[in-house]
Amino acid sequence: MAAHPDSVIDCSKVYVKRSTFSTEETGYFDGAFANVPIKEGELVEKGVMRRLPDGFDGNTCPYIFTWSTERPNKTWGMGSGCAPFYNTCKEGTANTRMVRHFDEDKFEIYATRDIAADEEMLHTYVSLKWRTCFAELNDIVHKDDEKK
C-alpha cells in the first residue's frame, strides 16, 4: 500500500527485521529490507529529518544522521521512517543512496541497482570514516582494505 500522495514520509516499500549481518557475536540489531522488488533508480523511501538541539554530539550516538556538509559536523538529525535501520557497507557496494535536502530537512533514498524483495538494503554512511561512534564498524567494513 502506497502512502497518501500528500505525505512527506513514505516507507511503504521497506520493512524492518533482524539484520542479516546480526549475530550473537556482533549483538543483535535490525536492518531495512525491500518489501517489494525495486528497480535501479527507483525511489525507495522519502522522509523528514528533525534537527537535534545545538550542542548535541553525534560522534557518540550511531542512531542519528550527519545533517550538513560542514566538517567537523555540528548539525545532527533524527530520520523518519525506516531510514535509521539501513546498515552500512563499503563505498561503491551499497544498493541504495541517500539524497539529502538540507534546506528542506527532507531526504530521499534511491536504489543504486535492482533490489529483490526481501533483500537487505544498505547505504554507505557519509560519516563512516570519521565519526568516533563508527570506529569499530569502520574497521569491520574496511578490514579487507588493510590486506591489500
Image: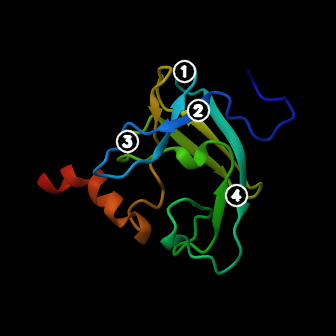
Task: Give the CA separation, mark 3 to mark 4.
Answer: 23 Å
Which residue is under mark 3? 92
Q: Residue 102: which numbered mark, if any?
A: 4
Q: Residue furthest left?
A: 147
Q: Up-down: is 58 above or below 55?
A: above
Q: Are marks 2 and 1 in contact (CB under 8 Å)?
A: no
Which residue is under mark 2? 15
Which residue is under mark 1? 39
Say which element carries label 3.
Answer: loop
Quadrant assignment for the N terminus: top right
Neighbour tally class for label 2: few under 14, some 14-19, many 20 plus, Cα within 10 Å: some
Q: What residue type is disc 4 on? A: Phe
Identify the residue at horizontal 50%, vertical 20% (top origin). Answer: 117
Q: Residue 99: which numbered mark, if any?
A: none
Q: What residue type is disc 2 on? A: Tyr
Neighbour tally class for label 3: few under 14, some 14-19, many 20 plus, Cα within 10 Å: few
> First in sequence: mark 1 or mark 4?
1
Q: Is residue 86 left or right of residue 9?
A: left
Can you see residue 131? no
Task: Give the CA separation, mark 3 to mark 2.
Answer: 24 Å
Say which element carries label 2.
Answer: strand
> First in sequence: mark 3 or mark 4?
3
Image quadrant in which you'd find residue 21 = top left
> First in sequence: mark 4 or mark 2?
2
Say which element carries label 1.
Answer: loop
> First in sequence: mark 1 or mark 3?
1
Say which element carries label 4.
Answer: loop
Q: Is residue 98 left or right of residue 133?
A: right
